[in-house]
Image (tube, rainbow, N blue to C red):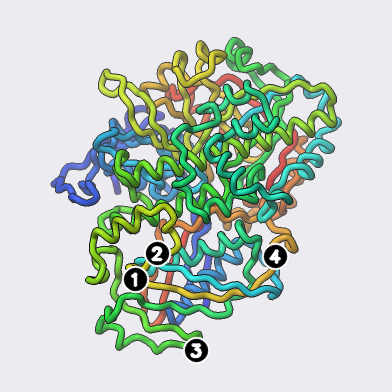
Amino acid sequence: MMELKKISDIEWEIPVEGGHRSVDPKTQSSGVMNVPARIFASEELLKSIKGDKSLEQVKNVAKLPGILKASYAMPDMHQGYGFPIGGVAAFDMDSGIVSPGGVGYDINCGVRLLATDLSIEDFVAKTKDVLHDFKRTIPSGVGRGHKEKLSVEDLKEILVEGAEWAVKKGMGTKEDLERTEEGGRMSVANPEDVSERAVRRGMPQSGTLGAGNHFIEIQKVEDIYDEDVAKVFGLKKGQIVVMIHCGSRGLGHQVASDYIKKLENELGVEDLPDRELISAPIKSELGQKYLSAMSCAVNFAFCNRQIIMNYVREVLERHFPGVKTSLVYDVAHNIAKIEKHDVDGKMKEVCIHRKGATRAFGPGRDELPSVYQKSGQPVIIPGSMGTASYVLVGTDESMKLAWGSAAHGAGRRMSRSKAVRELDGNEVKKDLNKKGIEVEAGSIKGLAEEAPDAYKDVDEVVRVTSEAGLARPVVKVVPIGVMKG
Amino acid sequence: MAYEFLEHTADVKFRADGSTVEECFSSAADALAETVRGEIDISEVEEKSFEVEGGDREGLLYSFLEEFLFLLDAEDFLVAKIKSIKIEDLRDGALSDSDKSRPKADEAGSHPESGDSLSRVSNKSESVSEDEIIQLTHKPEVVRGEAKELGFKLKCVVVGDRVENYKFTNDVKAVTYSDMFVKKDGNKWVCQVVLDI
């Protein structure tokens, strides 16, 4: 059993182990923890965390070269590959590494929230029609790309320009870009670093939702916890908002696979505690190439969400002519990037990995648009299908705790196979309908897999996130219509 | 030839086996296919062939399974059945003594497999220098054809149909190395894979 030291009711530590530190010259790995691991969780959440390998994984991350302060885990953590889902780690630019396993396969899987000027009273009678129209208009599911595939040239432009590409083509506004993490475009993105295979997997999938846990949800603002900040975010009680959750699809998955293989071929895998923890020094040629290719996939995902939001706006306009909408924010959940943080009293650049975690920057950060300079950034935490989701705000405190990061969702607690065995998709749908939630799903089995019972309690995740000071709740939204891929 | 699904919190995990590495890989492909398309039967309309390479058996299995995801995403192609699969050991004269005790190649046309595990490029062949390896892995488009110095090559012929003729929703994002192994257990080959969903 590994030691888990209680710091408080919502914070736990795996201390650095003693022992000999012989550093392998090739992998730079000492095989022992360089820093402690810090887990933000309640006793309740720990129960399911202890049920899988996530604690071992957060400990493995602490062994990586150049890791700073601690290997962090967010309250929604669960087992990933290499890094746990909910893992956050920063690395020194000179002695540290970048790892595809610290980002995940769905690079820039993320979520955006679109606010409307419609109220629940205006909307509710049309929920079913709108949802149906979403399903008809927005490509989703497997192998359901655009009928007209993009050209290679278009795709390469998207890899460089991200969401700007969509706006350039008339699918959005400048304000949308300001309200997207990184402005919807990571700068060091060279398509030359992306394999032809990745490009070919991405071409039919631009602007598609995909399947699995990806969704579009029509929600109403249920509760306001911070009136002032809610006003800044443009949110008020009873208002209709639309949440979009998707990522970089096959293109991002292929980039991750490609670089895991390249790194293996170069470095070997013998000394790794986990093959998915393969990494390269940040400033090495391969490290830089991965960051560039990953940025391309990040841009592809930003563009996807922008295109999908444009479909959403079109559908809303069809049913509510003259409707006004504005993007609250778009956040990435799986990403690595160079950010400036306080390291031992000095502001310096570090390479942050957030895998199943949301950036939660507090007020005054340069990265935030002027509208959120005073408040801090919106932190969007989607719940599972049919349950509440939350918008929180980054705080000064979050900057000091885990590199300005917070949880990213409910986090699974039940395997898909168990969910399918134990839950009936038709029942799940009935339950949702009873709660006043309309559902458009690609399959009944998918409904069982994504059932609320298969996930941790998002309310508890948000409570711990808030109590730990990682981010402060602003509003709670509840679904009235769900579209699954 | 068989496979079974195991518990995994977030993703799909399975174990597959066969009397040869080829059969074992085929079973793994069946498990992946079931994850992607569920119980739907796919017609055998079109034939495709591909080749993948890997430094060790795990790497080979990873690339092999990934090819099915590539065919699905990039070529809108769903595999119904593997027609033939053949694994070739690329290391000249690198077969170890333990090979003699292994079962004979089956009708699928398999080449005898080396029993020792290979996990580093640099351990493989004397004919390839360290410099060449570095240089090869630095080329931007080397993902597919980089493997002249690697350990194994797999050739596969599959039959299947266009994806638009079917409706299903299980999106497998990627093959992972998490908890992956390929090993000989008694007179069987067994592998384990976690798919990112």
The answer to whether tags 1 and 2 share a subunit is: yes
- Camera sees residue A113: yes
Q: Nearer the viewer, residue B175 or A471?
A: B175
Q: Is residue B62 above or below residue A17?
A: below
The mark closer to the camera, 3 or 4, is 4
Q: Position of residue B71 (x, y in %)?
A: 59, 63
A161 horizontally vs B100: left or right? right
Q: Nearer the viewer, residue A339 or A379?
A: A339
Chain letter for the residue marked with disc 4 in the picture: B
Which amino acid is tagged 4? Arg
Is the C-beta separation of discs 1 and 2 under 8 Å? yes
What separation in Å lies between label 3 and label 4 (alpha carbons)?
29 Å
Whichever of labels 4 and 1 marks the residue nearer the N terminus, that label is 1
- Residues A407 and B20: in front is B20
Q: Tell me whether the residue at label 3 lies in contact with that at label 2, contact meaning CB atoms closer than 8 angstroms.
A: no
Vertically, is A182 above or below B195? above
- The three-letter code of the residue at mark 1 reads Gly
Q: Earlier in the sequence, mark 3 or mark 2?
A: 2
Residue closest to the far front: A153
Residue highlighted by disc 4: B162
Q: Which mark is residue B151?
A: 1
Element at label 4: strand
Q: Which mark is residue B59?
A: 2
